[in-house]
Image (cartoon, helix red, strand yellow):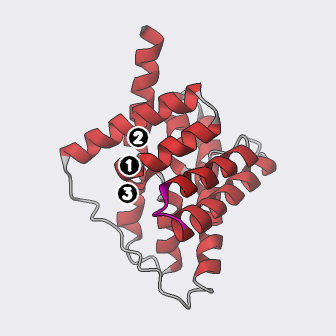
Amino acid sequence: MEIDKKVMMSEIGGAFVVSWLVLGSMGSDGLMAGLVLAAAMTAMAGAHILPMFTWMTIMTGDMQDQDNWMNNGMRLIAQVIGAAAAILMMTEGGEIETGYAAGDMWSFDLWPMVTMLAAGAIIGTIHSRCDAWMTAIAIVMAAGALGMGVGGAHDMASNLLSGGDDIVNSASTWVVDGLVVGLGAMIAGKIDENL
């Protein structure tokens, strides 16, 4: 396995932008957040930037390919590093409280899972057919339905930087949410192939 340094730097830079500008500064302004995300996705062409895209790539690729798993695993780590750098900057090295609280990993509710599955199918379809800016707008508009898909790297980095007290809950939620969104994209792709 050979690591593409440019891709990893794009993942770090893209996750930094998303954490700092989209989730940190303008998270409540959907249009502006979508435009910033679109700019980051365009500028960092080839980078997934958001963990949900990495999970979609894993789930829609060759599940038996070890390089697929390793390369995408490295992308997930790079995204957490980029988000951690943004959080360190925003919190002045931890001097300012982030207010992070992870969800309970053992709670299960069917409808949020179905919603994430549907959101994954929709975002996966848009991403496979449209330019990055359209995908970015759709992601911001569907952010509530995507679980940790949008802020996964940000949440993981925040937990790691705040002592990691709730890392097991964060990691399990991040993985499960990513897999469900990726599964939605995979199902949409299979339906599209068979139509």
* Residue 64, x across and y down, in percent: 53, 29
Residue 86: image quadrant is bottom right
Quick one: which residue is furthest to the top in this view?
195
Residues at marks 2 and 1 touching, judged by CB atoms closer than 8 Å: yes
Q: CA distance from mark 2 to mark 3?
A: 14 Å
Disc 3 marks which residue? 172
Quick one: which residue is furthest to the bottom in this view?
95
* Residue 186, x across and y down, in percent: 44, 28
Residue nearest the observer in this picture, 100 or 20 = 20
Amino acid bearing label 1: Asp
Closest to the camera, between mark 3 and mark 1, is: 1
Mark number for residue 181? 2
Amino acid bearing label 2: Val
Q: What residue is rendered at 39% in x and 48% in y?
A: 146
Q: Is residue 25 above or below residue 10?
A: below
Disc 1 marks which residue? 177
